[in-house]
Amino acid sequence: MKQLLQSLVILFILASPLRAEVVEQEPLTFGVLPIMSPVTLLKRFTPLSQYLSERLPRTVIIQSARDFPTFVKRVNERGFDLVYTAPHFVDLAMEGGRYELLVTPGSQLAASVVVRRQSAYQSLDDLRGRLIAHAPEQAFIPIVGKALFEDAGIGEAAGTRFVVMRSHNAAYEAVEGGEADAAIISSYIATRQLPADQWREISRTDLYPGVAILVASDLDPELKTRMRSVLLSMGEDTLGQSSLKQTLFAGFALADAADYQRLRRFLKFAPGMQAYLEDHQ
């Protein structure tokens, strides 16, 4: 998989219409949390790296890791120049001054626990010992949703079972098909996609900041300022708008590092992270 990833990176760089002065400089590495397959990850984030390469100008290459703990380890070792990471990893990445918060490409997030309107479940406690469907467990929404059950004392230790589905849509479809009793999904989906006469939200988490892009603190201050300016103004030109569309982002905004500090407690719920945290206490 590592060879495949490196080969694809090289192909994307060679195919990029970059100016000559871009490729003459040392490339910047853009580490992306492994939230999808290497091929899908490169397909989604390459338009953004190409836009940055063109506008900085400085070649930017996409890199990732085989799993979350390995990615976090590389970030902890200052293994990337730029980092795209989930909300609950931001504070850890900035620990010790290795990285600074650059921008956020996402709005605030919340998890909703939903059931069919005709079901007997009226509160979160009614779901004790029941089967709850959710999207892949590496994602932030399932993590904070499961923490909601744990905080209420009705998590896995109380007999509640959780089943992983391929997406948020698949999670609520499992409830619709009688395969699960409730679903943890994005509050955005709960509000925008589920008919109010067929579904009921019985609990919702607090609002949390979204994903973030970090920059290595030891990079040249002028370069960091330029990066921030380029990302914040992407929606102002045709190429930037196209890159945003292909990367599935609406745009970028400034964010406050303090907002991410309270999310650190969710790290223990991320797959494979408990052992990592114990080793780095």
Image (cartoon, grey):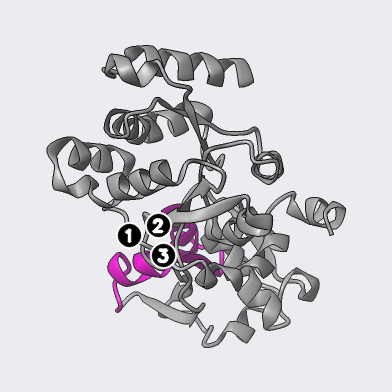
Task: Tell me residue 32's x, y (percent).
Answer: 51, 39
Q: Earlier in the sequence, mark 1 or mark 2?
A: 2
| Count of number-bearing discs | 3
Query: How many angstroms separate mark 1 from mark 2 (CA)?
Result: 5 Å
Contact? badges 3 and 2 (CB < 8 Å): yes
The mark found on residue 253 in the picture is 1
At a point 35% along the width and 67% down the height, the residue shown is 188
At a point 34% along the width and 36% down the height, the residue shown is 48
Query: How many angstroms separate mark 3 from mark 2 (CA)?
Result: 6 Å
Left or right: 51, with 77 as reference point: left
Task: Tell me residue 160's x, y (percent).
Answer: 70, 71
Based on the displayed image, in which of its 4 quarters is residue 148 positioned? bottom right
Query: How many angstroms separate mark 3 from mark 1 (CA)?
Result: 6 Å
Residue type marked 3: Ala
Residue type marked 1: Ala
The magenta segment is: 169-196
Task: Tell me residue 8's x, y (percent).
Answer: 47, 17
Residue under numbered circle 3: 255
The one of 29 and 279 positioned closer to us in this rendering? 29
Contact? badges 1 and 2 (CB < 8 Å): yes
Quadrant containing the C terminus in the rendered view: bottom right
Residue type marked 2: Thr
Residue under numbered circle 2: 104
